[in-house]
Image: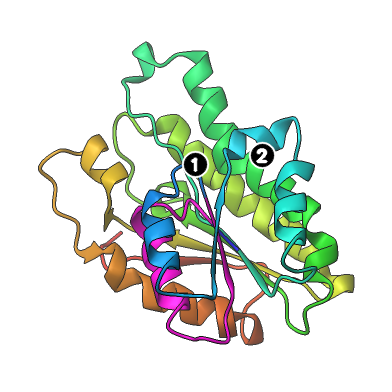
């Protein structure tokens, strides 16, 4: 299951997973236009139109949609994110709340909602897509204060859940990505060209989702070609 699958990294992940016909991809997005077009070519793609903010009030809605097709998930990739770039003095409390809701609270709700699905997998793996901005000691940028703070919270949530879910043999890791050329980055930093595209980073994340549980659990892994 991939969240934020309608564009950017999520869409690239979906396309990469679909290269394996034995892999069924549940692609979650508010806008499924691109996904619906893709599903005409791939029988193993299940686009699910869903607003993740609805998880805050009714997570069973998404659970019911997935349960129509399967009762098991091998991996959940919490990729959906929200970035509001504003000077600290101009940021509204509502902006901060929305970022923490989407970047921290919703991933936790999704994990809790689909625990029974994960437990049916031989090697369940949860991957939270974090940010280098949420890693202590990394370079920080003006206007990304609460975004970076929310990604830092997601990283710590990852460590805590890895410990708590050990008895169920569910691995939980966080990939702290550096800059990737996506619509979200372009909107936040017009004119900036990231060193990697979404299609270039997707194979790494897919391979990690499928096999990273063998080597890592409870880890926050920087995935960036920049220093620091």
Tag 1, which secondary structure? loop
Q: How is the image coloured?
A: rainbow
Residue 27 in view here: yes
**Which quadrant is home to the N terminus?**
bottom right
Compared across the picture, whether 182 is left or right of 120 comes to left
Q: Residue at x 45, y 36 (%)?
A: 147
Residues 44 and 209: in front is 44
Residue drawn at (46%, 77%) of the image: 18
- 95 sits left or right of 38 in the view: right
Query: Do we see residue 177 in this rendering?
Result: no
Question: In the rendered view, does 198 fall on the left or right side of 32?
Answer: left
Tell me how far mark 2 sits from mark 1, CA to CA: 18 Å
Mark 2 crowd level (few <14, some 14–19, many ≥20, 10 Å Cα): many
Which quadrant holds residue 174?
Answer: bottom right
How many other residues sit within 10 Å of disc 1, few (<14), some (14-19) or many (≥20)? some
Q: Considering depth in this image, is 56 or 38 the residue closer to the camera?
A: 38
- Are the two marked residues, 2 and 1, in contact with CB atoms closer than 8 angstroms? no
Position in image of residue 196 (x %, y %): 23, 65
The first of marks 2 and 1 along the sequence is 1
Residue 183 position in % (x across, y down): 27, 46
Residue 105 bears which disc, if any? 2
Which label sits in the foreground, 2 or 1? Answer: 1
Residue at 36%, 34% in the rendered image: 144
Residue at numbered disc 1? 30
Region rendered in magenta: 3-28
Residue 14 lies in the magenta stretch:
yes
Does the stretch in magenta take in 92?
no
Say above or below: 155 vs 23.
above
Please tell me which residue is depicted at 57% across the width and 33% down the height of the picture.
Answer: 100
The quadrant holding residue 227 is bottom left
């Amino acid at each position: 299951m991939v969240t934020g699958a309608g564009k950017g990294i999520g869409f690239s992940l979906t396309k990469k997973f679909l290269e394996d016909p034995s892999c069924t991809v549940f692609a979650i997005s508010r806008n499924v236009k691109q996904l619906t077009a893709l599903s005409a070519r791939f029988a193993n793609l299940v686009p699910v139109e869903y607003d993740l903010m609805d998880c805050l009030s009714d997570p069973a809605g998404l659970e019911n949609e997935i349960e129509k097709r399967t009762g098991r998930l091998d991996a959940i990739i919490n990729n959906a994110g929200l970035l509001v770039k504003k000077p600290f003095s101009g940021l509204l409390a509502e902006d901060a709340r929305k970022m923490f809701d989407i970047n921290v609270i919703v991933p936790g709700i999704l994990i809790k909602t689909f625990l029974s699905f994960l437990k049916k997998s031989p090697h369940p793996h949860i991957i939270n897509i974090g940010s280098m901005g949420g890693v202590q000691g990394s370079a920080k940028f003006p206007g990304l204060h609460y975004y970076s703070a929310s990604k830092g919270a997601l990283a710590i949530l990852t460590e805590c859940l890895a410990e708590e879910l050990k008895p169920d043999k569910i691995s939980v890791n966080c990939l702290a990505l550096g800059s990737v050329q996506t619509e979200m980055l372009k909107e936040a930093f017009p004119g900036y060209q990231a060193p990697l595209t979404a299609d270039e980073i997707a194979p790494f994340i897919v391979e990690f989702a499928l096999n990273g549980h063998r080597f890592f659990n409870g880890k926050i892994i920087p995935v960036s070609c920049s220093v620091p």
